[in-house]
Amino acid sequence: MVDPMAKRITVTANAFGAPLEAEAPEWIELIPTGSFRLQDGRGTYQITRPEQLIAESFRAAGDTKLMIDVAHATDHGAWAGDLAAAGWMAELAVRDGRIWARVEWTEKGQELIEKRLFRRISPTFIADEDSREVVRILRAGLVNDPAIPQLKPLAASMERTMDPQTLEALGLSADATPEEVAEATRLMVAEHDAANARLAQIAASVDHTGDVDDAAVTKICASIKAPPDPKHFVPMATVQELQAEMADMRKVVDGVKAEKITASVDRAVAAGKIPPALRDHYEAIAEQDPDAFDALVKDMQPVVTAGRTLAVTPERKEGELTPEQLKMAAACGVSPEAFAKTQKVITAANEARQ
């Protein structure tokens, strides 16, 4: 709260900022915080509590917007027509050692700036005469003669140019707009980030850790071009040959397994334990779990059917293949001798396991 008994002076600081842009900016630098000096000899002022200053300025104005006039006409008197507002400061904010104002420009203010009739902004404020503390911001004015050098220009010049080499690097023409420059820069940064991500993946694939600098890139390229280490890699031809051999062995094993299941079911049918009509059902059980099938058949009692002669599988000489086994060997592309040899090995392994 401002002390109403303290001595106050009203100051117009012609002009705080620097050139306004060709288009009226939404946010403008209004006044510095901390200590600042007017270059016209009126001395030094200070703002030590900027948030309190902002609150007090809007409170004293009746919580309305603060006006921007032309050439401080409100404070110094004006010629006809210049008392109209050029804009309204709807919001004040503190950042980067400054109090900034968000301005809602009138058509008049926009025209004055766009025609470059006024290039600077200057605040009018009330300060304590003894402490030189700014206690209230009243308004601001469009001016051309600066009084406070501390504030940086809002635009370095009214004509902004871009380095031709930069435009060429971005793939743009000399008359590119700021929006086109910004978009081209964004795309270039995105491509750079994507390239770095791909390079990091390549480095990880060759077990490289640490930064991927020029030396690391050279090392990675050399490792990619080098022949594979035989301790860690097998020729593709060898892998394909092994896969073919495994496929042949798998066919033989599957054939022997099927033959064993068929023989087990045949014996159960011949023993009268499984009705021929249920043969497919019990073959499915045997394929799913041979051990469970053997246990099931072992505990089954023979079923005697009147008038039915049970088929008995004829005895074979040791090593002799059944007709079904001969068909299986032919289907697998394996000679009967090789099939019999493989079956003998598997049978011996099963008997050893039991």
Image (cartoon, rainbow, N blue to C red):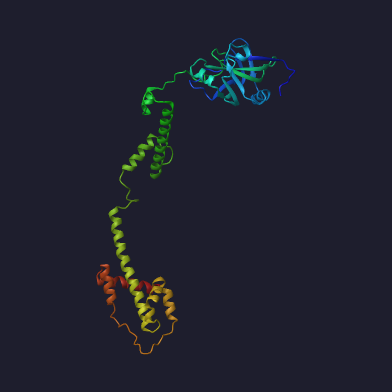
Q: In this view, does 316 lie above or below 177?
A: below
| Most distant residue in the bottom direction | 307
Quadrant that contains the N terminus: top right
Q: Is residue 146 above or below residue 212?
A: above
Front residue of this view, candidates 85 and 290: 85
Q: In which quarter of the image is residue 192?
A: top left
- Residue at 43% from the left image edge and 80% from the top image edge: 298
**Residue 68: which quarter of the image?**
top right
Q: Where is residue 187 in the image (x, y as percent from the top left)?
A: 41, 33
Give coordinates of residue 171: x percent, y percent. 36, 29
Residue 263: x and y, percent?
Answer: 34, 77
| Residue sticking out furthest to the front | 80
Residue 220 is left or right of residue 150, and the answer is left
| Residue 98 at least partly seen | no
Tell which of 299 and 62 is nearer to you: 62
**Which residue is drawn at the image coordinates 40% and 35% (left, top)?**
191
Q: Can residue 119 be seen in this view?
A: yes
Q: In which quarter of the image is the C terminus?
A: bottom left
Q: Tag count in the figure?
A: 0
Instruction: Determine the image quadrant of residue 303.
Output: bottom left
Residue 194 position within the rendered picture, expressed as x and y whole percent measured from the top left? 41, 38
The vertical placement of 196 against 123, above or below, is below
Horizontal arrangement in the rendering, residue 153 relative to residue 179 (left or right): right
* Residue drawn at 32 percent across, 70 percent down: 255
List the single residue furthest toward the right. Answer: 5
